[in-house]
Image: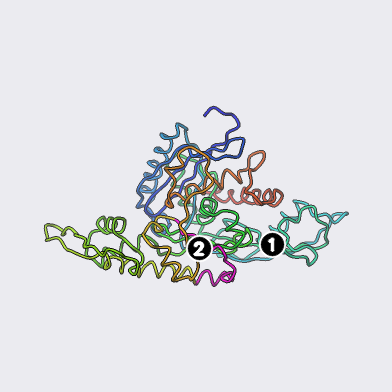
Amino acid sequence: MEQVNERIVVGLDIGTTKVCAVVASIDEQDKIHILGVGKAPSDGLNRGVVVNIDKTVNAIKQAVEQAQLASGIEVNSVNVGIAGDHIRSIRSKGVITINNRDKEITVKDVERLLEDCQRIMLPPDQQIIHVIPQEFVVDGQDGISDPVGMSGMRMEAEVHIITGLVSAAKNLYRCVERAGYEVADIILEPLASSYAVLDDEEKEAGVVLVDIGGGTTDLAVFQENTIRHTAVIAIAGKKVTDDIKVGLSVLDDQAEKLKHQYGESFVDMIEDDESITIPGIAGRPPKEITKSILAKIIQARMEEILEIVAIEVKRSGYSESLSAGIVITGGGSLIKNICPLANEVLGMDAKIGRPLGLAGGLTEEVDSPIYATGVGLVLHALRTGDTNEPILPKGKDKSVEHVMNKITDRMKTWFKEL
């Protein structure tokens, strides 16, 4: 790993049920290699928010140390994902006049306009995490993705602003620092996952990404290569485990095991309705249940998640223009037959999302939906990193991206003030 021109970044997905660390590098040909992966069980979070700092710190240390060992690289700073049902998304508009002599729009003008879009009333406990331009309008001409260099008198923009709870972000920050690492950036988890599992064609055609994790289900709607809507739903895999635990009167570990080994999301698709023996608690006799009974419990909760997804998709206003359908990722997507169920509930094509676009290294180790966010965090950092020359996703305009990076840098300062 002595190549001078190689950039190395670390993604840290701090989840409700697991903490996952991914170390990756990008070479001169823009090829991404996974160098190390680490995973540790986590129970210091509830619905994506830190509730126990010590447990979270230990899980972070464990996961990062595993990744360090596999990669042989010492980790100093990490890119952290943020989720939780405190995440809100707001549409905002701004307008400025172009006042230079030749009326040519500059990067500074775009920056000024995006700052104007951020003049919104926020509760004191909320802070802006991301500002994503939807489109620019120059002198009434809409549909412009990068106005720099154009001539005009008046420029407007519509942006998608994502906000989060200040205390939730601060606690994440504290956990990482207490574990001995610096926070390079904080990124919304569905945005990170989209980097890993969606390709440009899907984002162009219109797609909804659903990341079913342990504590939260993260959702992002893309259309014409731009993120149009985001939401975080506080129901996910942990709730499915709780339902099994209560419905079958078993222990938490047994419920989790049943979900992974025999769980199915769609009762109608069960071919072999075999019997499952559940050990009795504290010396009681074992119980027999069928696969279909377990599937009924799982299906009820999965349907609820997908019905809320359907409401959010409708709320986005893009439900009629999502030609690429739905991509489901995260640990919850591993429950068998989730795609046919999603097809039935949402009435659109569904597929499982696995990390794409990796050139080498431990690609097989991360070829699972559970690593979508971790891999997405490193892809986001590698492609939008504020090095001498940002490496941008295909189809992104450098001038707007430049402004976005500057805004992100400024946002990082609110963590530094802790």
Q: Residue pushed farthest right?
A: 101
Front disc: 1 or 2: 2
Membership of 177 in magenta stretch: no
Magenta highlight range? 311-329
Q: Check disc 1 and give the amino acid type.
A: Glu
Q: How is the image coloured?
A: rainbow
Membership of 328 in magenta stretch: yes
**Where does label 1 land, which residue?**
135
Where residue 259 sits in the image (x, y, percent)? 30, 59
Quadrant of the rendered image containing residue 272: bottom left
Q: Residue at x 28, y 64 (%)?
A: 244
Where residue 309 sits in the image (x, y, percent)? 48, 68
- Per the image, label 2 sits on a secondary structure element best described as strand
Task: Name the N-terminal-most of marks 1 and 2.
Answer: 1
What is the number of the mark on residue 326? Answer: 2
- Per the image, label 1 sits on a secondary structure element best described as strand
Q: Residue at x 60, y 51 (%)?
A: 411
